[in-house]
Image (tube, coloured by chain):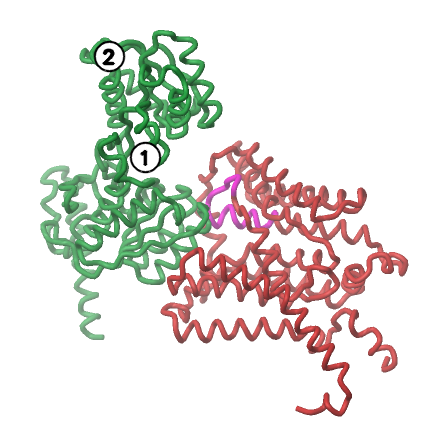
Chain colours: A green, B red
């Protein structure tokens, strides 16, 4: 008991000192980083502690995407740093059900909770409570409000997605270029529109001068509407050489239309899709390559980020650096975001290695 | 009295005696609850912790709230499956109003409760005036109200409420970790408990559940009673919607999706007969506590979500079969010769 007391006092004093130093650094505006000593027990150059309890809480269990990220990625990483891995969660993707599981994890004194939020606000209270019980919070795949977690492991940036989509369609269409079109989700989808804008910027570059964007249509993320819109594009633009559909519903519907039409192999298609939806179309030659992120890598990185947080190697502030096993070095960006990297390209050579 | 009691016994409403309040099934549920708490505390890390009960109570509040009027409805032989959609629609409307600049909390709550009353009245009208079966009507409004919730709010969430509102809603009773809102539930439980077990209206509810036609002939306003029960259920579901919105700081059209099943499960497990005429509030309150504690304890023991669903399903079947078995057993005991019955 007395040792605990002494430690408590020591930690408090050190924490107060660090705070004071941090405040000084902020005030002077110079000499940044000088205050971040090793006094607080942080070990920025050290290794991840052994025996950490790391729990993955996906949007829902029994979901192939999350089974891949958690069991093929998170579990592997946790095994590498000798922690205890678990995956838990509700069977339906509801925020209130997630709250109940977060409460359970905080009672179990879990060191790291890696969660994909069903609602960016609804699980905040429970996460804050878990934080105060000592857990480090990593969001992955889907973020909460920044103040409710320590870091967010983001799949890819909008810029990275736009670049990879244009590269893929350019490669598929070939050196002669030609007319291309975009089949998007809904007309007011924020992320889709941001990607489309960046794709236009990308197309303005000299290396893509032979590609000409002639149309953008919206399938509303509905299978039959996307199917009809793809059909309409080809009727309207007889010289169309390629379609980009940066939505999993759209790209699968367009692929289904193309594969059953005379355009198969003549009009190229790429987009953001999942391997299970696109496998048949890659094998029958309708689609050469498409992109998404590798969920296994996403889970792997999230586990390492959590391990680094719980070991005091990083705090989640901008500029923190850590090593994520086989994926290499990562730096925490603004708002505690860690970007996995460029989207992952699936083609006939690798698609059979994935099941989600 | 002595002459008429044996004749009326099988269908008589529970009287305000120890035995009446605590039928044998209620007692079984209470015993099961104590067992879960004791075994859980001894075997699962964290179940003995006060925080465990804070989380259990927070989760159980919406279910407990709606289970109170639902008990009365089921006792009259009807059912209301639209309650969770009423919660969702209330949340959506409240979120929309807040978003459009209505910033008074009392006004938001008042409008929500009135909305709940209207939604309940719609159910009540279809059941009483048009004489439609409540199962069909409320399956219809289950879809209708949820659909309206999506019309109001779409797939957006409204979440920018003042932090005090959401904090105050789940704040503990001073000196404990138990959220104060449980007192609202307790007050309503007493209200509905007195209404059901200690007033002529309550006795009327049992009579309606046992034989609606006979009760109508004996002067009970069957239709009017049922109508107001649906209104009451709507109001309480709306109150659950208010709690839900601020508990999770998020109004969404899909709030409380599927909650009606948890409520019906609790009511049936509490010993209320799905055919009407039998059951009491004490058993239902005990059942809500039992289901909540069991769920959270099993979750703490790392039982996966799928297995939890199986446990709940099994309990539900047991709750429908169980009271009948208990009743049959009691009936058999009663038919035995007296000398055998007195043996220990």
Q: Nearer the viewer, residue A180 or A110?
A: A180
Q: Residue at x 47, y 27 (%)?
A: A222
Chain holding disc 1: A
Q: Residue at x 43, y 71 (%)?
A: B40
* Crowd tier of the residue under label 2, counting other residues whose Cα lies within 10 Å: few below 14, some 14–19, many 20 or above: few
Q: Residue at x 75, y 51 (%)?
A: B228
Q: Which residues are magenta?
A: B238-254
Residue A245 image position (x, y, % from top left)? 35, 23
Tell me whether marks 1 and 2 sit on the same chain: yes
Q: Which mark is residue A313?
A: none
Q: Which mark is residue A204?
A: 2
Q: Is residue A244 left or right of residue B169?
A: left
Residue A147 image position (x, y, % from top left)? 32, 44
Residue A95 image position (x, y, % from top left)? 44, 47
Name the quadrant containing residue A271: top left
Of marks 1 and 2, which one's residue comes earlier in the chain?
2
Q: Is residue A132 left or right of residue A5?
A: right
Question: Mark 1 = which residue?
Answer: A275
Q: Residue at x 23, y 36 (%)?
A: A339
Residue B245 in magenta stretch: yes
Q: CA distance from mark 1 to mark 2?
A: 30 Å
């Amino acid at each position: 008991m007395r040792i605990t007391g002494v430690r408590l006092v020591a930690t408090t004093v050190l924490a107060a000192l660090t705070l004071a130093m941090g405040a000084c650094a902020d005030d002077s505006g110079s000499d940044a980083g000088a205050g971040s000593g090793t006094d607080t027990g942080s070990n920025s150059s050290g290794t991840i502690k052994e025996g950490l309890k790391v729990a993955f809480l996906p949007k829902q269990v029994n979901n192939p995407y999350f089974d891949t990220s958690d069991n093929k990625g998170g579990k592997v990483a946790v095994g590498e740093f000798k922690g205890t891995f678990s995956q838990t969660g509700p069977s339906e993707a509801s925020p209130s059900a997630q709250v109940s599981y977060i409460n359970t994890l905080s009672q179990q004194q879990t060191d790291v909770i890696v969660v994909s939020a069903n609602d960016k606000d609804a699980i905040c209270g429970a996460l804050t409570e878990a934080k105060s019980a000592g857990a480090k919070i990593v969001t992955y795949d889907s973020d909460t409000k920044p103040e409710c977690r320590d870091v967010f492991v983001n799949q890819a940036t909008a810029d990275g997605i736009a670049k990879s989509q244009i590269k893929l369609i350019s490669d598929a269409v070939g050196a002669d270029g030609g007319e291309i079109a975009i089949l998007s989700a809904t007309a007011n989808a924020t992320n889709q529109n941001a990607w489309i804008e960046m794709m236009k910027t990308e197309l303005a570059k000299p290396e893509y001068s032979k590609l000409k964007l002639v149309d953008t249509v919206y399938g509303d993320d509905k299978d039959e509407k996307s199917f009809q819109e793809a059909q309409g594009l080809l009727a309207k633009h007889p010289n169309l050489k390629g379609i980009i559909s940066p939505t999993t519903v759209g790209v699968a519907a367009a692929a289904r239309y193309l594969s059953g039409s005379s355009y198969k192999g003549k009009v190229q298609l790429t987009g953001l899709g999942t391997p299970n939806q696109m496998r048949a179309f890659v094998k029958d030659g309708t689609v050469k390559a498409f992109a998404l992120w590798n969920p296994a890598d996403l889970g792997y990185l999230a586990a390492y980020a959590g391990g680094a947080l719980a070991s005091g190697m990083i705090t989640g502030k901008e500029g923190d650096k850590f090593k994520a096993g086989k994926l290499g070095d990562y730096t925490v960006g603004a708002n505690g975001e860690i970007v996995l990297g460029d989207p992952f390209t699936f083609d006939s050579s690798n698609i059979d290695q994935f099941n989600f | 009295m002595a002459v008429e009691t044996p004749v009326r016994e099988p269908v008589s409403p529970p009287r305000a005696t120890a035995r009446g309040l605590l039928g044998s099934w209620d007692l079984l549920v209470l015993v099961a609850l104590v067992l879960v708490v004791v075994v859980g505390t001894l075997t699962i890390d964290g179940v003995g912790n006060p925080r465990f009960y804070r989380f259990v109570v927070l989760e159980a509040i919406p279910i407990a709230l709606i289970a109170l009027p639902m008990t009365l409805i089921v006792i009259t032989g009807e059912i209301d499956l639209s309650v969770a959609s009423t919660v969702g629609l209330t949340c959506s409307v409240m979120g929309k109003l807040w978003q459009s600049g209505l910033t008074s909390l009392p006004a938001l709550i008042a409008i929500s409760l009135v909305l709940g009353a209207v939604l309940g009245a719609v159910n009540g009208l279809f059941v009483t005036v048009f004489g439609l079966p409540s199962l069909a009507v409320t399956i219809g409004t289950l879809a209708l109200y949820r659909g309206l919730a999506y019309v109001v709010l779409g797939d957006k969430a409204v979440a920018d409420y003042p932090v005090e509102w959401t904090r105050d809603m789940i704040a503990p009773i001073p000196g404990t970790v138990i959220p104060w809102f449980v007192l609202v539930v307790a007050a309503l439980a007493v209200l509905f408990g007195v209404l059901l077990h200690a007033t002529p209206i309550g006795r009327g509810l049992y009579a309606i559940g046992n034989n609606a036609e006979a009760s109508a002939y004996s002067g009970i306003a069957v239709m009017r009673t049922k109508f107001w029960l649906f209104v009451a259920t709507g109001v309480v579901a709306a109150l659950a919607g208010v709690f839900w919105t601020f508990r999770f700081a998020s109004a969404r059209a899909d709030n409380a999706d599927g909650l009606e099943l948890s409520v019906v499960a609790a009511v049936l497990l509490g010993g209320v007969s799905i055919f009407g005429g039998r059951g009491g509030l004490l058993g239902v309150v005990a059942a809500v506590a039992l289901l909540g504690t069991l769920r959270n304890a099993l979750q703490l023991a790392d039982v996966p979500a799928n297995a939890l669903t199986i446990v709940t399903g099994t309990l539900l079947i047991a709750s429908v079969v169980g009271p009948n078995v208990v009743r049959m057993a009691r009936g058999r005991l009663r038919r035995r010769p007296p000398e055998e019955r007195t043996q220990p």
